[in-house]
Each structure stands twice: as structure tokens, then as C-alpha cells.
Amino acid sequence: MQTIDRYNFRNKKAIIRVDFNVPLDKQTFAVTDDTRIRGALPTINKILADGGAVILMSHLGRPKGVEEKYSLKHVIGRLSELTGKTVLFADDCAGESAKTKAASLKSGEILLLENLRFYAEEEGKPRLPDTATDEEKKAAKAELKSKQKEFAKLLSGYADVYVNDAFGTAHRAHASTALIADCFSAENKMFGYLINSELAAMDKVLNSNEKPFTAIMGGAKVSDKILIIENLLNRVQNLIIGGGMTYTFMKAQGGQIGKSLCENDKLDLALEILKKAKEKGVKVYLPTDAVNADTFDANASIKVSKADETPDGWMGLDIGEDTIKTFGEVIAGSKTVLWNGPMGVFEFEKFSKGTSAIAQAVANATANGAFSLIGGGDSVAAINKNKLADKVSYVSTGGGAMLEYMEGKELPGIKAIRG
Ligand code: AMP
């Protein structure tokens, strides 16, 4: 497999799939968080420093066609500031402007292409009215599939080499993330630095011999996390469960959960997980106490109870002090830590204490030599909110992609290059 470090980009045009799906101000369209743009800089800078030319392609949002608010032109200003270069722009990623601008692009120059998802070919999902019949949907999908290959081929024609650095979309088999790789020889396709570091962090955790390995799983639902939990049961020594999914486990074991979040169709599954964990010698830590609310509201009244004795009419929205202490001790004694999902409704200040305490415990364990990986949108938001991003080993940028990789799935964008 080719690597970016080995490759000399001198006099080469590189087309890079980046993830510039950044949040924009609704009125001014200014970039409000440039983390993803900064994430692509090491790859861009290496290519420019080698004496190559850079063509950047990305999606932005979920447009249903050409939509001004999703134009990548909104990113030009920030990209230009961060690279210190003029950024050329092609206002149609598959039109004449892209073709001619790419053809005349010189070493040291950057060309940004307009949003790939302005074309349905990128995702291969037909854009049909809701009234379309199943037959029509099937036919449109088949037609789009062959067009998708042509679209990928067209994009590949702009450059000599393909670099995929968009980890956030690596779990999608899209034209620019997977199909395009087939248009380049093995020597001329590779991952960028961001994907490399994501893979290194995830592989380090998945194959870790540094024990104990503790997985902290939180968030809303068991159903979203079941596959990752099952995969992790083969690897971890400790499994900490918090957040809304706690209550499915509590109810399954006969606890009283008041009106806490619960997936009644997943009660058997919860028991199955506990049984499997026992068989595999994995210690499962569930909350022992909880901070309950009378309504799902930032200003709700609070009542603390045992986690399996939620009073009638109340709902558990955060872990309690005893739980914070127990979870904190387990984390402190860990050598490898994976954290996905908040311990409570951390968006409400009153119910954010448990999540903040866990964030701090993970940071402390890291300071004591543990390797810690944080992934999934909300745990990343929680780490950032507590200003601890630089106190943990790695914060993943790819929510869905990270989850699928940790579930043991093959990601199309990774397979397309790794084989
Ligand atoms: P996920 O995307 O599955 O990681 O879930 C994150 C969401 O779970 C956040 O928006 C939290 O507010 C929510 N959450 C965490 N704990 C609870 C809880 N005890 N009850 C309801 N929602 C929760």
C-alpha cells in the first residue's frame, strides 16, 4: 500500500477527498468551527511542500441538488487564511470550470471544487419525489449506479494521484470516497495524515495489550451501541455503562425506572449482553445512583435516588455521586480507555456533572500513562466543553465511521485503498 510519507508529489496534481462539512453561521455563512479544515492541513501542506498541486473535493451538508447555502465557496476565506494561499474555486465540481481549472493548475496552487453532493451521483441515492413507487426507486437506483462510476472517473481525470483524508465519510461507499480509488493504480492512491492518525488510534485501542482496557459506553440508546458493545466484549476487561441506555439494563433486571428512557424491545438483548460479559469475564459497571428530573427540561426539579429505584413520575438524567466515584476508580486503574457517549443529558447544566466528571477521570488516567480514545459526536462535544481535548490521547473526528470501525466492520473508504 502506498503511503503519503513515501510519496513525492513534485509536479503531480493530487485530488484530495477532505471533510469540509463544517458548521456555518446561518446568516453570514461564515465558518463557525474550522476544526475539520485544520484537520486537513498536514496533508495539504505536505503536497504543496513537495512541489505538487492540490485539488480539494468535499461535501457540505445534505443538499437535494444545487443549494446556495451548501456551497463550498463559504469555506474559501477560512481555507485561504489557514493555508496562507489564494484558493481557486470551481463552481461546478463536474463542469467545464473544474476541468479547465484543474488542467491549468500549477505546482503550489490550491483548487477547491464545489460541493460533490450537488450531484446525486456522489452518494448514488436517487432524488425522487416521495410519491415514487418502489419500482421507480429501484430503476432510478440502478441507473444512478452506472452514472456514479462515470462521475468518479470524471473526478479522477483531474489529477495524477488520489488521497483520501475524509475519515468522517469513510464508512460510505460514495464516488469520491471509494469508487474513485479504482481509477488509480495502487502506487497512486493513499490515505492522508488525518485518516492515518485515526486508523492508528483505533487500531491501537482494538489491539491493545495494555490492560486493563475499559470501555465507557453512554448516550441515549442501547440499540445504537449494541454492535460496538458486542465487539468490545471480546477485548475489554471493564465495561462501564451510563447515559439513557442504563435504564434498559435496569428494567431488564427488574428495577424501577419511573419514566426514564427505555427500549422495551431491547430488554432481552440487555440481559444477553450481561450474560455474555459474565461468560467472557468482563466486569460490567452500571450506575448505582442517579440524578432524576420531574420533566425533560434544563430547569427541572431534581431528586437523587438509587439508579434502579427511580420514583414514579421521575426520569434519570445523570449519574449520581456514588456512581461517579466508582466509575472514576475503574477509569483511574485503566491502561486503555475508550469513551463513547455521555453519562447523562449533559446539554442541560443541571445534568452535566456526571459527564464532566468522567471526562476529567479520562484526562487524569491519560496523565498517568493510559491511552485514551474519545469518539462519537457527543462525547467529543463533552470533552471540548470541559476543555480537555488536549489532555486525552486521541479525539476521533469521525462519529459514524469510528463506531463502524470499532464494531469490526470494513469501511468502504478504507478498503478501497487498503484492499
Ligand atoms: P448518543 O448519540 O447515542 O451518544 O446519545 C447522546 C444523547 O444521549 C445526548 O444528547 C444526551 O442528552 C442523551 N442522553 C444521555 N443520557 C441520557 C438519559 N439518561 N436520558 C435521556 N437522554 C440521555
Image (tube, rainbow, N blue to C red):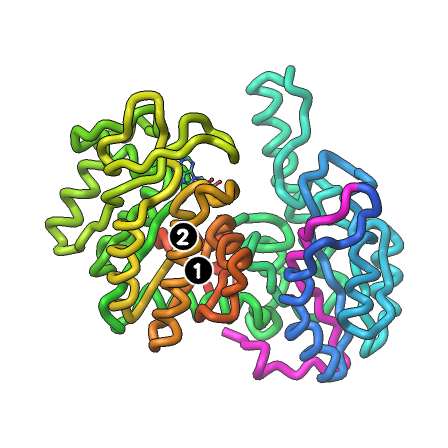
Task: Give the SS element for disc 1.
Answer: strand
**Residue at image location 35% in from the left, 26% down from the top:** 314
Task: Give the SS element for disc 2.
Answer: strand
Determine which residue is flagged by label 1: 374
**Residue at image location 47% in from the left, 45% down from the top:** 346
**Residue at image location 41% in from the left, 43% down from the top:** 344
**Residue at image location 57% in from the left, 26% down from the top:** 138
Q: Earlier in the sequence, mark 2 or mark 1?
A: 2
Determine which residue is flagged by label 2: 340
Residue 51 seen anywhere in this rendered image of the structure: yes
x%, y% of residue 171? 50, 51
Horizontally, is 233 left or right of 375 in the view?
left
Closer-to-camera residue (88/376) = 376
Closer-to-camera residue (347/217) = 347
Horizontally, is 227 left or right of 384 in the view?
left
Does the residue at mark 2 contact the one at mark 1 (Cβ under 8 Å)? Answer: yes
- Examine the residues drawn in magenta and state their main secondary structure: loop
- The stretch in magenta equals 1-26
Closer-to-camera residue (378/169) = 378
Residue 411 seen anywhere in this rendered image of the structure: no
Q: Is residue 355 above or below residue 390?
A: above
The total number of labels drawn is 2
Residue 5 in the magenta stretch? The answer is yes
> Label 2 neighbourhood size at 10 Å, few (<14), some (14-19), many (20+)?
many
